[in-house]
Amino acid sequence: MQEEMTGAEMVVRALKDQGVEHVFGYPGGAVLPIYDALFHQDQLRHILVRHEQGAAHAAEGYARSTGKVGCLLVTSGPGATNVVTGLTDALLDSVPIVCITGQVPTHLIGSDAFQECDTVGITRHCTKHNYLVKSIVDLPRVLHEAFHVARTGRPGPVVVDVPKDVQFARGTYARPRDNQHKTYRPRLKGDLGKIKAALALMAQARKPVFYTGGGVINSGRHAAMLLRELVHMTGFPITSTLMGLGAFPASDKQWLGMLGMHGSYEANLAMHDCDVMVCVGARFDDRITGRLDAFSPNSRKIHIDIDPSSINKNVKAEIGILGDCGHVLEDMVRLWRETAARADKSALAEWWRTIEGWRAKKSFSYRPSAKLIKPQYAVERLYAAVKNRDHYITTEVGQHQMWAAQFFHFQEPNRWMTSGGLGTMGYGLPAAIGVQVAHPDALVIDIAGEASILMNMQEMSTAIQHRAPVKVFILNNEYMGMVRQWQELLHGGRYAESYTAALPDFVKLAEAYGAHGIRCSDPAKLDEAIAEMISTPGPVILDCVVSKEENCFPMIPSGKAHNEMLLGETVEDIGAVIDERGKALV
Amino acid sequence: MPDTSTSHYPAAPKVEPTARHTLAVTVDNEPGVLARIAGMFSGRGYNIESLTVSETEHASHVSRITIVTSGTAHVIEQIKSQLERLVPVHGVRDLTIEGEAIERELALVKVAGKGEHRVEALRLAAAFGARTLDATLNSFVFELTGATDEIDRFIAMMTVVGLVEVSRTGVAAMSRGPQGM
């Protein structure tokens, strides 16, 4: 099927052909023909944001909560530069998004024209791939290829830069039949020999652990289900990175909680002491490993990843399996069952006893207060209030993000949207809007800090306009809490610029946007305030005033090993529950 | 050495021995592909000692890039993986680990001088097997093709007899034997 149309019409048509239903964006001079094409149709819904960064995060939230490719449309120059943070965020967290940027007409490229910037040059380092389309002839192919590249292999952001004259030009549109890149063919199936070797290693393990990450979520729901099956069949303990939460249910008894800098004591010590580590779709990031030369010193490591550059990048894997988590897990489940493989039962029982000793330390415990709302308590109460509803959680970045990861227990994949790799303050609100657009009837909550939320506060206006009833749950301690914590622990308590002075009145701010605002500072009234937030139909900001100087524990200080973890004071009070060896590790 | 306990990041790894590797990379000859590859090297802190690029299969728009880089064994592995994951890259081959590859570059060398220097320059050029592309009463332009260290030696000699200017192509390389890329 071939049709004559303009470049702008091709953009809209290609998005529809790729199954896009929502596009986040902001108009401007160099994309007006595409906006004109959007005006003439009503299948593709445009969500007008208030800043292009918001469009990128909204597309990320949309993508991560649905497993589909998120899409955004922005203009040249400042439109393109404003999405750079969002693109980088998507690159580090492997989120598939396609960003269409307008560009000045081809004959003006390089002349420093109004709102011109070298978009492909600027975004080359923060995208998986990018294109400048200089001819209408290439446009249909590039548009479809962009979606293919974004979603295939290790997903990531792709930019298509379309000059204005190409948008006006007429050409022939045809949807490519196979919709594939001519050479880009990531390997999906893992090497069977290596998978068998991995299973043999697992069957001999005495102290095994599964360490899983965002790759399992990206691989799709079936991968999470296969992971559950494999974990249950083997009886091994499992921990996950921040990005992988929800792939394995937090209510399961084999679940050790999140690992890493603010992960649980049992997860980190299990990683440190294990003899076989099965890493599925995670990348041994520095927030996970701590001091590299002391990272899990006695274990043999299996690493499953779709990106060849992730294997052996930071940590040497004895068995590196290149492939998609879902495909590899499928083979592992099948072969484990076929060979009736079995782990060493008595060794495993002994390992679990050790782990239970660590678990008994209750490393996430905190000192409750009747006068002040403790931030941990706030997240616990929020979880209690929403756990039986269809809910999605996004966060900003900082202490509140870690408390959310520690105290909100995820049971399902794609329910947890957070900026892990880049650590982008301001991610949560636009991401929540993206999630809400994809799931209009679900309860979508942005767990925020008062500092982060101000970075993209303007998106409240987007939420109001598009009737996206997102709930913003601010843990307000008047500090950039994580910065303050580092200054307290590592910089002698000199709180340089980390106090959020001159904060707005969030209740009035909510009202100014046309949303509902609630403030709560009394622990006794917290449940009531949360109930009001949930039952109010439109967007809500709940300003939850929490204790100001609470630290996020446990914590592995940077440059330290997993067994050099700092625990909160309340945890050390109950030190008696662990044995001498365990104490030596604190 | 900063105190790692207050750093946000783990300490730098220990220094390990480095080696020089020659990589042959085939890529789609599309705009920006060279910037993508050069940018990957600079962005991730890898070295480029030499980089040569030209289209090799015109009909299918395929170019061949020869990169000479150096790094620890681990860094070389990372460089290859990072190259492989770039969308327009077809294939990466490490010629150094496949046995001694043939490596050649071409240099144009201009010398100027009179009397003994001039005679000596001509004598050295003949000894190295360089061709004389241009001659005036007080200058020569020589062309020499050879391995990198041979060209280095030639240029060092020419410095003594009045070197004016050097232009080098960088390394083109190919493995020995019947196997293709």
Image: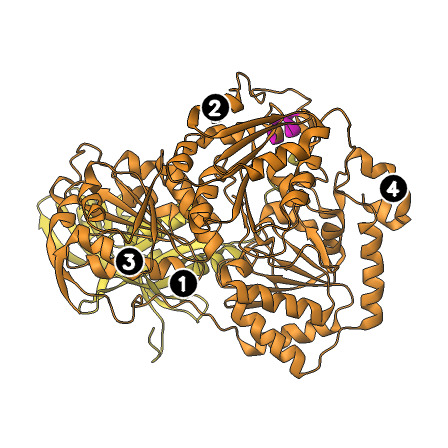
Chain colours: A orange, B yellow
Name above or below for residue B5 compared with residue B94. above
Residue B116 at least partly seen:
no
Q: Secondary structure at mark 1?
A: loop
Q: Earlier in the sequence, mark 2 or mark 4?
A: 2
Residue, x 39% and y 46% (percent of image)?
Answer: A126
Front: mark 3 or 4: 3
Badge 4 crowding class, 10 Å Cα cut-off, few under 14, some 14 to 19, many 20 or more, is: some
**First of labels 1, 3 by sequence position:** 3
Q: Chain of mark 1?
A: A
Q: Are marks 3 and 2 in contact (CB under 8 Å)?
A: no
Q: Position of residue A300 (x, y in %)?
A: 68, 64
The segment highlighted magenta reads A482-487
Mark 2 neighbour class, 10 Å CA radius: few under 14, some 14 to 19, many 20 or more: some
Q: CA distance from mark 2 to mark 4?
A: 45 Å
Instruction: Tell me where residue A115 sits by quadrant.
Output: top left
Q: CA distance from mark 2 to mark 1?
A: 42 Å
Q: Which residue is mark 4?
A: A575
- Say whether mark 4 and mark 2 are on the same chain: yes
Q: Which mark is residue A224?
A: none
Q: Where A388 sits versus A204, above or below?
A: above
Q: Which mark is residue A152?
A: 1
Name the residue at 87% across, 50% down: A581
Which residue is labeled 2 in the image? A509
Query: Of the residues tagged 2 and 4, which is closer to the observer?
Result: 2
Q: CA distance from mark 1 to mark 4?
A: 48 Å
State the image coordinates of residue A327 (x, y, percent, origin top left).
52, 71
Residue sitting at 66 percent across and 80 percent down?
A: A337
Residue farthest top in this picture: A502
Q: Amino acid at mark 3?
A: Lys
Q: Do marks 3 and 4 share a chain?
A: yes
